[in-house]
Image (tube, rainbow, N blue to C red):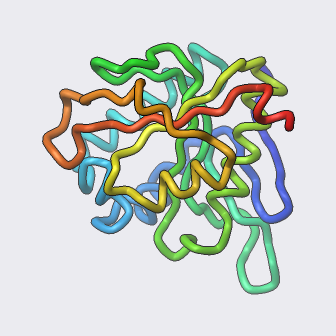
Amino acid sequence: MPEFRQETERLVLRDWTEADWPEFFRVTNTPTVMQWLGGVLDESARAALRSRVETCAALHGHCFWLVERKADGRHLSGEPLGFCGLKRADAPGSSVTGEFEIGWRLREDAWGRGYAKEAARAGLAAAFDRFAATQVVALTVIGNEPSWGLMKRLGMRRREELDYPDSRFEPPLRDTIVYSLSRDEWKR
């Protein structure tokens, strides 16, 4: 599979390099960013996340891509904002195992500026146009209102019949809620 790179008006989504990981963790592995994602990752958990992303990309030709900000007069080109991309849903007990799953994680100072929506729209376009997805799901917990709010703004719809408990976590992180978007809904 050729290297992935997709540009939007303000962002670049691309495959990772070795040098990206330390800065990604520096800007996203904070208590505020990780509040709904299981908490700040220790060294072992950071290595496991990196391994999962790299293995996913090798197996499927896609995973979570690094999201960089383009130069805009105030910021330098290449400033990492976090990640956004596609994986195959694989959580224990998942009701959507194997489906295309979109996810994002952006640094706190990038919140509220439309970057997550811009990156997610690029990820959805890649899912449907490049990877031939028929449906994409997004997962979060009920307390993570900014995340499911974005899912709604992307045109995704809540699928309560697909909600499931994730045995890796205790409440309030255990009870996973599911949103989805079909190819037909995306094309409208």
Q: Residue 69 vs residue 41: left or right?
A: right
In the image, 30 versus 99, the foreground residue is: 99
Q: Quadrant of residue 95?
A: top left
Residue 37 percent location from the top left of the image? 32, 49
Residue 85 percent location from the top left of the image? 61, 39
In the image, 182 versus 75, the foreground residue is: 182
Residue 14 percent location from the top left of the image? 71, 43
Q: Residue furthest bottom?
A: 74
Residue 49 percent location from the top left of the image? 38, 37
Q: Is residue 110 above or below residue 144?
A: below
Q: Residue furthest front?
A: 161
Q: Residue at x 70, y 27 (%)?
A: 182
Split into 4 quadrants, where in the image is the N terminus?
top right
Split into 4 quadrants, where in the image is the C terminus?
top right
Q: Quadrant of residue 59?
A: top right
Q: Residue furthest left?
A: 170
In the image, 105 versus 14, the foreground residue is: 105
Q: Residue at x 52, y 60 (%)?
A: 106
